[in-house]
Image (tube, rainbow, N blue to C red):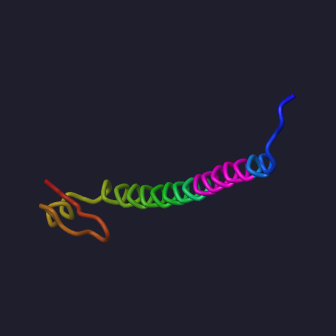
């Protein structure tokens, strides 16, 4: 029969806890990154909706309004180029 050295079980338990700690912190970082990505996607969606509403308004401008805005100009928060 093999004789085990004293303290081996304690060492194995410490290694197991270290592995669990590393995995737990990696999962927590992944969850935080996922939450951040979701918030960024929601903000981008809002920006796209605002830009879409602005382009819907520009699409119905009469020719006289478009002629006054020839070239590239700042229009609200966007750069509008009329050629």
Q: Is residue 22 magenta?
A: yes
- Looking at the image, residue 2 lies above or below residue 32: above
Determine whether, in the image, residue 79 is placed left or right of residue 37. Answer: left
Determine whether, in the image, residue 21 is placed left or right of residue 13. Answer: left
As drawn, which residue projects farthest toward the right? 1
Name the residue rendered at 18%, 58% in the picture: 81
Residue in the foreground of this view, choosing between 48 and 41: 41
Which x, y percent locates residue 78?
Answer: 29, 65
Residue in the foreground of this view, choosing between 60 and 77: 77
Which image quarter: residue 71?
bottom left
Name the residue rendered at 52%, 55% in the picture: 37
Residue in the foreground of this view, choosing between 47 and 37: 37
Which x, y percent locates residue 61?
Answer: 28, 59
Which image quarter: residue 76?
bottom left
Which x, y percent locates residue 36?
Answer: 54, 59
Q: Is residue 81 magenta?
A: no
Question: Which region shows up in magenta?
Answer: 14-30
Which image quarter: residue 21?
bottom right
- Of the 4 image quadrants, the one containing the N terminus is top right
Name the residue rendered at 68%, 53% in the picture: 18
Name the residue rendered at 21%, 64% in the picture: 65
Determine whether, in the image, residue 78 is placed left or right of residue 35. Answer: left
Which x, y percent locates residue 15?
Answer: 70, 49
């Amino acid at each position: 029969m093999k004789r085990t050295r004293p303290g081996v079980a304690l060492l194995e338990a410490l290694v197991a806890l270290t592995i669990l700690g590393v995995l737990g912190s990696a999962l927590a970082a992944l969850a935080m990154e996922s939450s951040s990505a979701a918030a960024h996607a929601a903000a981008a969606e809002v920006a796209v909706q605002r830009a879409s509403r602005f382009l819907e308004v520009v699409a119905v401008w009469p020719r006289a309004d478009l002629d006054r805005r020839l070239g590239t100009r700042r229009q609200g928060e966007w750069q509008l180029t009329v050629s």
